[in-house]
Image (spheres, grey):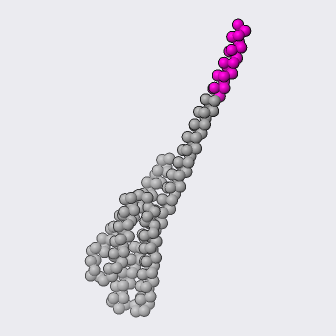
Amino acid sequence: MEGWKFWWGIAAFFLGGLATQLNGWLTYRRQRKDRADDAADALRQRREEFELQHLVEVHQLLRSVMTHVLSSRVLAWNLADGVGGELMEESYTEARRAYQEAMDGLVSQVGFVFDDEVRGKVGEAAARLAWAFDRHRREDRTQEVLSTGEVVNEAYAALTARVRALYAGRAGS
């Protein structure tokens, strides 16, 4: 019987060591998974913040371009009618400069929109606004120029829908 107690102590020692190793390994796996999940969450959050920032910026730039297109058209029509003289000419030149600055900003930011559908709608709106900007005479396809507003409104709707989707995803997290 004395041998049995000896071997039982050794077996218990090895089983305890094995249980400790198994517990350590399971803990390590769980911690590694938690760290990977935390890293994935941090990456997702950074991506969403980046996207939100650029969606809002693109929305503001699109509004700015639209405003400058409309104001430059009105100023061009007034100049064509002989209204305002030199002051109107300066205002028109300033409106063209502001339009170009806003359009450059918009074009440079469109590529940062992650969603393909939204990026396509914003790109189409930018192209239509550029087209409309060059149509200053009243008789230049007025209906097509007016339909530019519809294209821009679709881009606004796509941008705001994407922002809402991002925030809804955050609320569901």
Report the residue at 41% width, 58% height from top. 115
- Can you see residue 85? yes
Residue 42: x %, y % from top left:
55, 51
Residue nearer the viewer, 88 or 108: 108
> Is residue 15 found inside the magenta-colored segment of the image?
yes
Residue nearer the viewer, 3 or 144: 3
Report the residue at 28% width, 77% height from top. 142
Q: How many marks are shown on the rendered structure?
A: 0
- Can you see residue 61? no
In the image, farthest residue toward the right: 2
Residue 144: x %, y % from top left:
28, 73
In the image, farthest residue toward the top: 1
> Which quadrant of the view contains residue 73?
bottom left
Residue 22: x %, y % from top left:
61, 29
Residue 30: x %, y % from top left:
58, 37
Report the residue at 56% width, 46% height from top. 38
Name the chief secondary structure element in magenta.
Answer: helix
As drawn, 47 above or below 13: below
Placement of the N terminus among the 4 image quadrants: top right
> Which quadrant of the view contains residue 76?
bottom left
Report the residue at 42% width, 81% height from top. 96
> Is residue 133 found inside the magenta-colored segment of the image?
no
- The boundaries of the magenta stretch are 1-20
